[in-house]
Amino acid sequence: MSRRRTLRRVGLLVLAANLALVVGKGVVYYWTGSLAVGSEAVNSLADSAYSLVIVAGLYLTTQPPDFEHPHGHERIEPFVSLFVALGIFAAGGAVLWQASSTLLSGDVSVARGPAAASILVVSGVVKYLLYRYCLRVADDTNSPALAATALDNRNDILTASAALIGVLGAMAGYPLLDPLAAGLVSFGILYTGVEVVQDNVDYLVGAAPPEDLRREIIRRALAHPDVEGAHDVIAHYVGPEIDVSLHIEVQGDRTLMEAHRIETDVVQSISSLAEVDDVFVHVDPREAGEWKPDDEVDRLVGGRIHDREDEP
């Protein structure tokens, strides 16, 4: 299945699951009056609201390239992820406010009965399955929006667990467990929002990819038998994908066709990396005097590429 269809399917699945949880929690809240379940219904309603934005965002990011966007629309994804982060911050702030106000007022009331506990257990299981599924698809498709959605579903497992502790605590005669657990979980939710922002800011500002990927890019360039060195290697994020530019060093007695073939082979080898979008390779012949040391390249490959002392 294509990346486009996969992302849209996952977005619609997350939206449908959140809407089903809104209905289920709303019905149980109406029956029982449980404050914990009511807050969870509001949380799921917020999830549904920005799930709509995610579906719309993923629809835009999976549109094919056009004249105005020759590289496609994937660069919209970090903005979708930042919107998810706003939802995470809102949920964390709401949980913290509710927990604090409840503790300060001393008015703690959690309904007893199996219905409230049951819907929270169901919510936790559904959110765990969505978390694992979204995380797997995010890894397979290199989608920051789905990675952020996976983290948000992980947060919802924590909030459902806190609400469940509150319900069970009330049933056992300790109703203060509800706001205390919710307050602790709110900090975990807010921290996850920070993680999502940090991850996606790198995509937006063109940060360098992880070192192991930079090392693999250089290794593939140097693996060609006619490439004797590389320098000025630049790899950076453009949205969730990576653009690469580098100079490769070859002997100057190669014909134009041979140099073109070497360049094409290196471009194809690096482009086959799933994270890489565009690759730009400049061929430097030895006689041009443009071979030069590159400490970063030498560090990544574990030593000097070749003896530079006899260079012109």
Image (cartoon, helix red, strand yellow):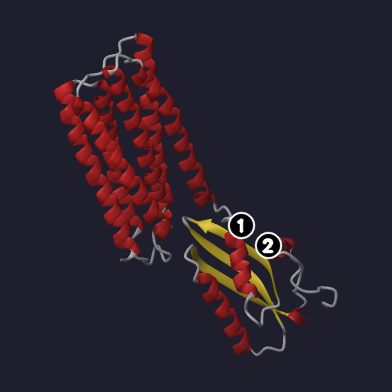
- Disc 1 vs disc 2: Cβ atoms closer than 8 Å? yes
Q: Which residue is mark 2?
A: 300
Q: Is residue 296 above or below residue 272?
A: above
Looking at the image, residue 283 sits to the left or right of residue 7; the answer is: right
Would you call the spot at circle 2 few (<14 residues within 10 Å), some (14-19), or many (20 or more)? some
Q: Is residue 228 above or below residue 52?
A: below
Q: Position of residue 151 (x, y in %)?
A: 40, 43
Q: Which residue is mark 1?
A: 211
Residue in front for this viewpoint, 187 or 114: 114
Q: Is residue 16 above or below residue 168?
A: below
Q: Amino acid at mark 1?
A: Glu
Q: Position of residue 292 (x, y in %)?
A: 76, 70
> Dividing the image into 4 quarters, which one contains the C terminus?
bottom right
Secondary structure of residue under mark 1: helix
Q: Which residue is pictured at 72% across the width and 89% down the height?
A: 253
- Residue 293's tag is none
Would you call the spot at circle 1 few (<14 residues within 10 Å), some (14-19), or many (20 or more)? few
Q: Position of residue 36 (x, y in %)?
A: 28, 24
Q: Which residue is pictured at 28% across the width and 26% down the height?
A: 39
Q: Amino acid at mark 2?
A: Leu
Residue in front for this viewpoint, 57 or 95: 95
> Dividing the image into 4 quarters, which one contains the N terminus?
bottom left
Q: Which residue is pictured at 62% across the width and 73% down the height?
A: 221
Q: Position of residue 150 (x, y in %)?
A: 38, 46
Most distant residue in the front direction: 172
